[in-house]
Image (cartoon, helix red, strand yellow):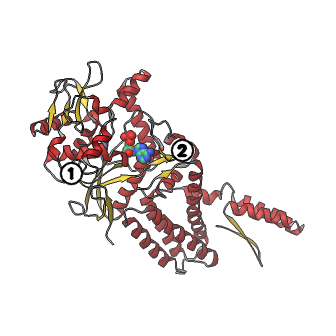
Amino acid sequence: MALKVYNTLTRDMEDFVPFQGKKVNMYVCGPTVYDHCHLGHARSYVSFDVIRRYLIYRGYDVNYTSNITDVDDKVINRAKEIGEDPFILSRKFTESFIEDMETLAVLPPDTRPKVTEHITEIIQTVETLIENSAAYVTPKGNVYYDLTRSEGRIGILSHQTVEGLLEGSGNRVEVEYDKRYQLDFVLWKSAPEGEPGWNSPWGWGRPGWHIECSVMSMKYSSGQLDIHGGGMDLIFPHHEAEIHQSESCSGKHPFSKYWMHNGFLTIDREKMSKSLGNFFTIKEVLDKFSPGTIRFFIVYTHYRSTIDFSEETLEEAGKARKRLLNTISNVKHDMKEAHEERNDCGLTELVTETREAFINSMDDDFNTREAIGSLFVFSRKVNSIISSEKPGRGALENVLRFFSEINDVLGIFAEDESNASENMNNGLSEENIMEIIRLREKARKEKDWAKADSIRDELKEKGIVIEDGKDGVRWKRM
Ligand code: AMP
Ligand code: ZN
């Protein structure tokens, strides 16, 4: 089966065929850095990280660009509020964002361009748009994209009618500007002297938001993108504006072949966002949950579906992930005693089948939910095989290699996590376990069956199973 991608542009599942063979130019809108990032941001960047990692897994050569919006009204207003220099503020939160992404094992982009480092190119692009009669300058020194030029293409990505968009734009901030047509969008905003800005042919000012992504995405690709990504809230006006201005500037259609949008992370069914104040920063969530659990929580939902956040669902995610970690730990444990001889016990075939299921799900518009579902089935079968048979070392190694192959895509386990749980068994060393088993033996001798059973249940909760055999008591990890 070929890889299929849901394209917001066509509202259809399409075969994934990049412009140039296996080369994929991918651009994902980065954060506006005026505060610490919240879990909604993590949802977007982890989702696109898994998409990127899967493309690499499937042999694509991915060139991944994701920007930093380090100058913007929000940055400037926040800086004013707290009396800090806006550029120092944005640098601080850029660092905080990069640190969060590293902790969450999000691969760094090949290029992470900042707006403030691309002002010259932005001004040049705006000049080109004016030369192409796609933009106009107002007496106040603002420059707008002239959307009447794109008649027939308005609503191309949002699939809304002009009337619908006009109605919806009534509340937007841009209305306060001096544009000719309500749906025109700003490319360059004049700014009062003393406010952060740059000199331009139209006076002191700074770029509008949309233009930065066109300029930086075209600069770091071949002028056209295979995939452009971001959260659903960016479809309109941000991404639609990018299409109009990029195509008017480069003359290349389509600006991006596939448009992909992640669903929201919500709290009580409302989008987590800074403006609503209903957010938990990534750092706050990391105080309670491991990076692997947070990633698992995100990728155990399809990237286009909504995730409703609660501590309970994160805890559930942690438990579910632990089941997979326990299997890895069990296999590692058994490898210590495994013989060299080729006693496969069906494990190799099981790995092959599961790999196929994993790829089929991921090829279906990156269906991580279903892909992880097949890992749970795999994990249960592996546990059952190793608890009843004695697979050889090669077969066990194959299982571990497969987990690591899957983890290259999902990034849900840290490198030494299963070793830690193997050594510690949920905080219990092997001596601790033997000691507890001796206590249970004592209770059994004294015919205190309730105590013996409760010890057994306690161990089970920690992933340790006790088996009473002819030669005495044996224990295993679940
Ligand atoms: P911003 O800094 O608000 O421009 O957001 C950066 C990226 O994070 C955009 O692609 C947003 O769509 C995405 N994003 C922000 N909040 C959420 C959320 N609650 N759920 C999913 N994605 C979000
Ligand atoms: Zn953008």
Please state the quadrant of the image where ligand 2 appears.
top left
User: Which residue is depicted at the point 19% across and 43% down?
Assistant: 245
The residue beneath circle 2 is: 286
The image quadrant where one finds the C terminus is bottom right
Q: Gap in Å between the C-alphas at discs 1 and 2?
A: 37 Å
Question: Is residue 458 left or right of 122 when viewed as pictured?
Answer: right
Residue 468 picture location, percent across and down: 76, 74
When the figure is inspected, residue 164 is found, relative to residue 300, above or below; the finding is above
The mark that comes first in sequence, 1 or 2, is 1
User: Which residue is depicted at the point 63% across and 78% down?
Assistant: 388
The residue beneath circle 1 is: 255
The answer to whether any part of residue 101 appears in the image is no
SS under mark 1: loop
Say which quarter of the image contains residue 191: top left
Depth order, front residue of 204/62: 204
Question: Is residue 452 left or right of 360 when viewed as pictured?
Answer: right
Residue at the extreme right: 446
Residue 111 picture location, percent across and down: 30, 45
SS under mark 2: helix
Depth order, front residue of 53/393: 53
Please, what is the three-letter code of the amino acid marked with disc 1?
Phe
Residue 370 picture location, percent across and down: 46, 66
Front label number (1 vs 2): 1
